[in-house]
Image: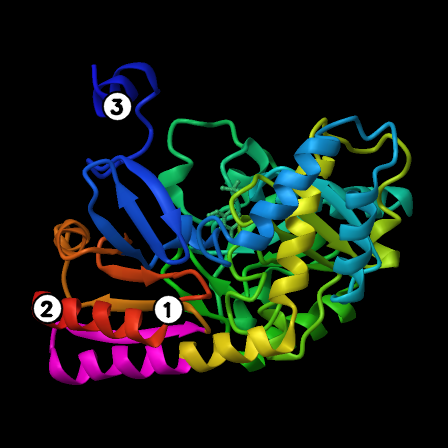
Amino acid sequence: MNTLEKTDHYILNTYPRQQTVFVKGQGATLWDDRGNAYTDFLAGIAVTGLGHCHPGVVRAMAEQAEKLIHVSNLYYTEPQAELAELLVQKSFADKVFFANSGAEANEAAIKLARRYFREKNDTGRFKIITMDKSFHGRTMATLSATGQEKIKQGFSPLVDGFDHVRFNDIQALKSRMDGSVCAVMLEPVQGEGGVVPADPDYLKQVRQLCSEEGCLLIFDEVQTGMGRCGELFAHEHYGVVPDIMTLAKALGNGLPIGAMLASDDAATGFAMGSHGTTFGGTPFVAAAALEVVKTVSDPSFLTAVREKADYFAHRLNGLKERHSSVRQVRGVGLLLGLELDAKQPDIVLECMKKGFIINLIQDKIIRFAPPLVITKEEIDGLVKALDALL
Ligand code: PLP
């Protein structure tokens, strides 16, 4: 059996895979096993922000792998402490909990929000309001939090205590707000839901409402964080600060790591033994993530992301002007979406044939989440290919 056959035979068939075997990556380029090169406009779904096999991250991994890969969270390790300190210095937060994925980071946030009120002897506050079309993960609690019916099918009974309201609609949120709500949880830019940014006023009003009602505000920045949107965290664009934020995806540039960041006050929800995981913040992944945070948080790096993002959006808007099949271009930073007026199931494969990797969500929205090191020339190449295909 070849790799495709073995994969389809031995691995549970839960992913709609392209018939391609990748063997190598460097920067924004991937190579398949037939030697074909592709420019990657997906970055492992917003994961390899610094590009494939980034030399600094590879060096940090290699050096740490020779020293110490894993002990346990029953002990202290230097990379974990350094990473936590840097994340706190670069964010609103005071405390960090390390997990292994976005779903796990969100699971931690959900648990923290509930337990925060139990610590205060407020047993009535347990409900978490999330948004229609949101995506928070595939564990039982995070899929219950997710506002998309299709990913919940077949898994009932779901975890109790989640409510969903229309995104960008403050009245909808107000109408469901009561003394049973412990938190509101949302993505500043909905990723899986179709690359839909929060309206600036809306996010400010959500913050105000949560403060007035005495519940916590959780930002899921699993997809939008780590420079993806042109600031280290997307919420910085909005000037709105949450109580809890979750990160994953690009934090490890490909190594599995998630993090939940909390203010000192919100963090009081967890006490000794409240939560834990074997691999969370293991020295190997923490060393890689430390290199990622140092690199991405450099102001000149973020300025370059914003410049390229503006250029990319401008070029995509040019496509919209030329092709009536393009309905809308939207997004923030290098998380961009191009909505088509009809389903285009073949566009991903057609783009691959031209040497570009893109991603289609909701059948007709092309999501672009390239490595943040993408060049203007690479953007030009993709736009030319899309121009021909559209
Ligand atoms: N939250 C958001 C906003 C995401 O985009 C994702 C994944 O796409 C997740 C959570 C889940 O992350 P993971 O797949 O690492 O569990």
Where disc 2 sits, the SS reads: loop
Of tags 3 and 1, the one toward the viewer is 3
Q: Which mark is residue 390?
A: 2
Where disc 3 sits, the SS reads: helix
Callout count: 3
Q: Which mark is residue 3?
A: 3
* Residue range of the region highlighted in magenta in the rendering: 310-332
- Distance of mark 3 from mark 1, alpha carbons? 32 Å
Query: Would you name the residue on which mark 1 appears?
Result: 336
- Distance of mark 1 from mark 2, alpha carbons? 17 Å
Colour pattern: rainbow
On the picture, is 223 further left or further right than 108? left
Amino acid carrying mark 3 in the image: Thr
> With respect to residue 136, does 213 lie above or below?
below
Where disc 1 sits, the SS reads: strand
How far from the left and from the top, in percent, is residue 330? Answer: 36, 74
How far from the left and from the top, in percent, is residue 2? Answer: 21, 20
Residue 125 in sight here: no
Residue 327 highlighted magenta (yes or no): yes
Amino acid carrying mark 2 in the image: Leu
How far from the left and from the top, in percent, is residue 317? Answer: 26, 82
**Residue behind label 1 places its C-beta within 8 angstroms of ligand 1:** no
Q: Residues within 10 Å of mark 1 (few under 14, many from 20)?
A: many
> With respect to residue 57, does 142 lie above or below?
above
On the picture, is 79 further left or further right than 291? right
